Amino acid sequence: MPKYDLEKIKFALDLSTFTKAVDLYDKKRVTQFRNLNDGYSATVLGGNSYQVFVSSQDFEVGSCTCYLGANNNLCKHMISVLSSQ
């Protein structure tokens, strides 16, 4: 499985989203992290508890139960999970 390079991912996002994602990780809001065959899953604690999955092959492929993730958009919760891998 490839290990994501967060420095490269940072340039694919707006700075605010990336900063919030790293903050979630730093504050230990990423829980129940699991390294699966095809990606990574975790629960991210924010305003609510979000169930997150991110593909191990493409960081833009995944799901999150937040509003953005439910609409197939990359969100801070997905990036915070990548910070854990």
Image (tube, rainbow, N blue to C red):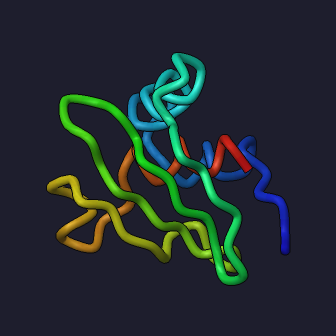
With 47 as the anchor, is 73 left or right in this view? Answer: right
Instruction: Single out the residue that lies furthest toward the right.
Output: 2
Percent x, y for residue 54? 53, 67
Instruction: Single out the residue that lies furthest toward the front.
Output: 32
Closer to the camera in the image, 24 or 7 = 24
Percent x, y for residue 2? 84, 70
Residue at 64% x, 73% y: name it.
Answer: 39
Residue at 19% x, 68% y: name it.
Answer: 70
54 is higher (above) or lower (below) than 34: below
12 is higher (above) or lower (below) than 10: below
Residue at 48% x, 48% y: name it.
Answer: 13
With 20 as the anchor, is 64 left or right in this view? Answer: left
Q: Which image quadrant for residue 22?
A: top right
| Number of marks in picture | 0
Q: Which corner quadrant holds the N terminus?
A: bottom right
Instruction: Single out the residue that lies furthest toward the top.
Output: 27
Residue at 27% x, 63% y: name it.
Answer: 69
Closer to the camera in the image, 12 or 61 = 61
With 25 as the anchor, is 51 left or right in this view? Answer: left
With 51 as the anchor, is 61 left or right in this view? Answer: right
Percent x, y for residue 38? 66, 82
Percent x, y for residue 5? 79, 51
